Image: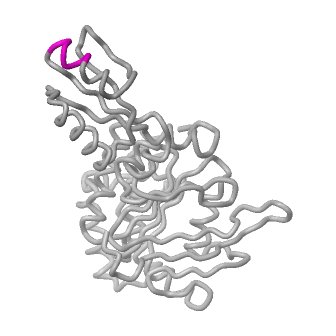
């Protein structure tokens, strides 16, 4: 993440209501270029509404938005020209082949005929759809349809792509294949704005995560930073005998111990500073540790703690 670069997406005070129901209550977001930014939240929290506003599909009630350096209120056409969008459901035409779907998108983007054919061929190769390119999309598996859908969003070579729950309904193998596609996009300098129902997905892919709940951003940071916001983290120390185990327990106070495995659990946020303090105390007391492991809460714990409800896949 390079904070010296202008943000790929910048949102300030974004608001949206439907009648008396407030969906977004003044949210702020910043997405750095060439990164994956994940927006998480319970069903109905406003994730899709946020994506729809940022991609110019619906208007906001208030707030300032810049996407790709363009101001939403003044340059919506420039924003549309510079982004790719993949919604929750694959928007492919089942009657057309994969190749025809891509060529149709090239025509809609007004690419020259030769350029459109070349781009379609490149994307079929990139997304491992060459053999299926001549088959109708109706014959595709779920994973193939999602790959084709993302490929269609890349026909115009956008530098920013919005993926709204791109792996919903996919089996684990197809989901991991989609993760690699996202990593490859970012490796090529593309910025990815991701919403997902799968917390593991955000943990695997995102450099930064914002948690949206009840119309506001309740937490934001890297996956590791978010995990340290909730209790439950600890460091497990393993010793080679009972004597150093008991000595460490006396030094550190009453802790959870296992005298059969010679292990001691010490409450910790898992940060470097707290780990250094712990090891310094043990070294000063001449207590030797055989090995240690750090355990932090996962994003499910974060989600439950901050929203009061479990995330549903």
The answer to whether one can see residue 96 in this image is no
Name the residue rendered at 25%, 56% in the picture. 130
Q: Residue at x 14, y 17 (%)?
A: 240
* Horizontal relation, residue 269 to residue 80: left or right: left
Q: Which residue is most to the right? A: 20
- What's the image's color scheme? one colour
Q: Is residue 281 visible?
A: yes
Residue lying farthest to the bottom in this orientation: 74
Q: Taking 83 as reference, is 185 above or below it?
A: above
Image quadrant of residue 238?
A: top left
Q: Position of residue 97 (x, y in %)?
A: 39, 58
Magenta extent: 241-246
Any magenta on residue 242?
yes
Residue 281 picture location, percent across and down: 24, 37
Q: In the image, is residue 1 above or below residue 279?
A: below
The secondary structure making up most of the magenta span is helix
Left/right placement of residue 234 relative to residue 60 reads left
- At a point 31% along the width and 74% down the height, the residue shown is 2
């Amino acid at each position: 993440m390079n904070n010296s670069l202008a943000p790929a997406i910048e949102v300030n005070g974004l608001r949206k209501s439907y009648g008396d129901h407030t969906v977004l209550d003044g949210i702020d977001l910043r997405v750095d270029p060439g990164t994956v930014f994940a927006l998480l939240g319970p069903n109905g929290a406003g994730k899709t509404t946020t994506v729809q506003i940022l991609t110019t599909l619906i208007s906001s009630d208030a707030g300032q938005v810049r996407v790709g350096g363009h101001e939403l209120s003044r340059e919506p056409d420039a924003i549309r020209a510079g982004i790719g969008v993949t919604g929750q459901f694959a928007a492919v035409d089942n009657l057309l082949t994969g190749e025809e779907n891509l060529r149709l998108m090239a025509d809609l983007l007004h690419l020259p005929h030769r350029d459109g054919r070349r781009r379609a061929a490149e994307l079929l190769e990139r997304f491992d759809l060459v053999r299926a390119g001549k088959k109708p999309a109706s014959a595709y598996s779920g994973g193939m349809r999602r790959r084709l859908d993302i490929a269609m969003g890349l026909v115009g070579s956008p530098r920013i792509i919005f993926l709204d729950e791109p792996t919903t309904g996919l089996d684990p193998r197809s989901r991991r294949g989609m993760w690699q596609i996202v990593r490859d996009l970012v490796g090529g300098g593309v910025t990815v704005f991701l919403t997902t129902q799968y917390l593991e997905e955000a943990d695997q892919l995102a450099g930064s995560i914002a948690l949206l709940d009840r119309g506001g951003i309740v937490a934001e940071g890297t996956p590791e930073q978010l995990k340290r916001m909730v209790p439950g983290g600890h460091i497990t120390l393993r010793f080679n005998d009972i004597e150093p185990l008991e000595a460490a327990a006396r030094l550190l106070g009453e802790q959870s111990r296992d005298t059969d495995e010679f292990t001691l659990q010490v409450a910790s946020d898992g940060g470097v500073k707290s780990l250094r303090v712990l090891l310094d105390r043990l070294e000063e007391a001449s207590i030797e540790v055989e090995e240690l492991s750090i355990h932090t809460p996962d994003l499910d714990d974060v989600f439950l703690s901050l929203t009061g409800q479990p995330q549903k896949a």
